[in-house]
Image: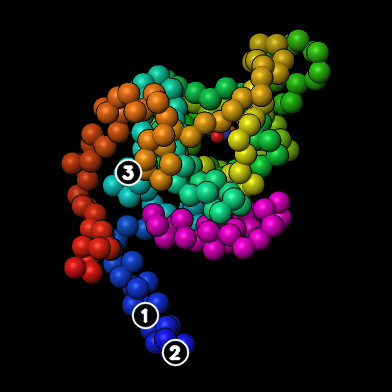
Amino acid sequence: MCKVCEDKTLSVYQSLVSMDDGNPFPNLVDRISNLLGSRGINELSEDDINELLNIMNGYKSKRCDWDRYAYLIPGKYTRNLVDDGNGSYNLLLLVWDKNSQSPIHDHSGSHCIMKVLEGTLTESRYEWPLKDDNKPMNLVSSTDLSKDKSVYIHADKIGLHRVSNNTDTLSVSLHLYTPPYQICQTFCETSGNMRASSKCPFYSVKGVPINSELEENDDNKCTIEKMLCKFKSKSLTKLLG
Ligand SMILES: N[C@@H](CS(=O)O)C(=O)O
Ligand SMILES: [Fe+2]
């Protein structure tokens, strides 16, 4: 195919993709991929971080855009992989049951941008504890993040943190980690002692459950309120006939 035809085909394809149900979520994923996919995973300038924040802030969350990734396990939070950026980042959708929280943790040196997609989450930051100090950890800040708010976190430079859903309904957030990490350190709030190096598991990958806790229970798919969503998605296949 000649270059002109190739460009035309690409632009028709892109307009079909963008027409596909008007779902801007794939567009958000593509923009992140375009920005991070081609660079060394440790190189993130201040401009890159601002650009990523702009991308995240530019997306206005609608449940029907992303609910196929959203799995809930009662009493805890789940980590659902949306995109692995070919190894340069992880984009994760986290579903927080009411009154659930993460342990105080680091991010193994990775950058993190987090956006609330639904509900309200509280992000609390703590000072790094002194070794063998055995004192309660110092809380530096605690911020309530409502729907569509984004925040940049470098847990290791800024301090340690935890995220809590202190509400009586579930909350959902989108987390971008670059470089991706599989293990983090967790800390005991009352003694400041490092508890453990914890594995950070995925519960589903690209909408498919991979964790036995999910497989055992079909009711976990948090699409129960899907019917409330006005915009039913049309797949590209349907659109193309
Ligand atoms: N960093 C946590 C979520 S949050 O509490 O920031 C995780 O990836 O599981
Ligand atoms: Fe975190």
Q: Is 42 in the magenta?
A: yes
Looking at the rendering, the quadrant in which ligand 2 lies is top right
Residue 137 shows in this picture: no
Q: Residue at x 37, y 43 (%)?
A: 207
Separation (CA) of disc 3 from disc 2: 38 Å
Q: Is residue 227 above or below residue 213?
A: below
The magenta stretch spans which residues? 25-52
Q: Position of residue 75 (x, y in %)?
A: 40, 19
Mark 3 and mark 1: span between their CA atoms? Answer: 29 Å
Q: Position of residue 5 (x, y in %)?
A: 39, 87
Q: Is mark 1 within 8 Å of ligand 1?
A: no
Whether the residues at callouts 3 and 1 have beta carbons within 8 Å, the answer is no
Q: Nearer the viewer, residue 110 or 118?
A: 110
Residue 179 part of the magenta segment: no
Which residue type does callout 3 highlight?
Arg
Q: Tell me the kind of residue under disc 2.
A: Cys
Disc 2 vs disc 1: Cβ atoms closer than 8 Å? no
Mark 2 burial class by Cα count in 10 Å: few <14, some 14-19, many 20+: few
Residue annotated with mark 3:
68
Disc ID at residue 226? none
Q: Is residue 39 left or right of residue 143?
A: right
Q: Quadrant of the N terminus?
A: bottom left
What's the residue type where badge 1 is placed?
Thr
Alpha-carbon distance for marks 2 and 1?
11 Å
